[in-house]
Image (tube, rainbow, N blue to C red):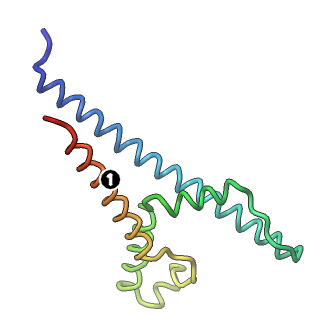
Amino acid sequence: MRPPRVLRVLAVGIGLLLLTVGSAGGGLWLVGKVEFFAALSRAEADALAELTGEEPKYQTWTAVAGGLNRALPRWHDIDVITGNTVANSVMTDTQQEAEGKTAKKHLPTWGGTLGVTFAWIAALLGFSVWWFSRKDY
């Protein structure tokens, strides 16, 4: 005996939702890791160029990884920015020095991180509205 149609549709819907979330999360994680190694490669090329006195020569894949990282939602940047904000508001200057938090490192901006994330949310929401508006249920 087959389960009722409602249960089959529900099971397929849940399965597709899990597949989408898993692949999107895994894809964003992979792009973030590739960008991390691309940044290391660019820093290495910068150091070599500084020693030789020439312009740095970056590999093509580093530019592609950087472009993807800037175009896709940057979930890890939100964690970094929030952690830095909490550390600045809770820790004293002495505690920050002891933890090594005072080093001036590149921090992502709130505007860029949230702007890209909200743009993706708006685009995907618009796509879903369009998709479901053309279906006859």
Residue to which mark 1 is pinned = 124
Helix, strand or loop for disc 1 = helix
Q: Quadrant of residue 68?
A: bottom right
Q: Looking at this view, is 98 or 118 the one in front?
A: 118
| Residue drawn at x 52%, y 56% as measured from the top left | 32
Q: Locate residue 42, reporting x and y percent.
A: 70, 65
Q: Quadrant of the C terminus?
A: top left
Task: Tell me how many marks there are.
Answer: 1
Tell me where residue 41 appears, x and y as whole percent.
71, 61
> Measured from the top left, where is residue 9 in percent x and y?
18, 28
Please determine whether, in this image, residue 135 is positioned above or below residue 112.
above
- Name the residue located 26 percent from the left edge and 48 percent from the top edge: 130
Query: What amino acid type should be assigned to the residue bearing mark 1?
Result: Leu
Task: Classify 10 Å Cα crowding around label 1: few (below 14), some (14-19), many (20 and above).
Answer: few
Task: Return the residue nearer the eye: 100 or 55.
Answer: 55
Query: If the image is split into quadrants, where does the N terminus sit?
Result: top left
The image quarter containing residue 85 is: bottom left
Question: Residue at (48%, 84%) from the top-left corner?
Answer: 96
In the rendered view, would you say 132 is above or below 137? below
Q: Residue at x 36, y 63 (%)?
A: 119
Hey, which residue is sitting farthest top in the picture? 1
Q: Is residue 128 above or below residue 82?
A: above
In this picture, residue 107 sits left or right of residue 86? right
* In the displayed structure image, the side of residue 133 where residue 103 appears, left or right: right
The residue lying furthest to the bottom in this view is 93
Q: Nearer the viewer, residue 3 or 72?
A: 72
Left/right placement of residue 126 relative to residue 104 reads left
Residue 5 as seen in the image, left or right of residue 90:
left
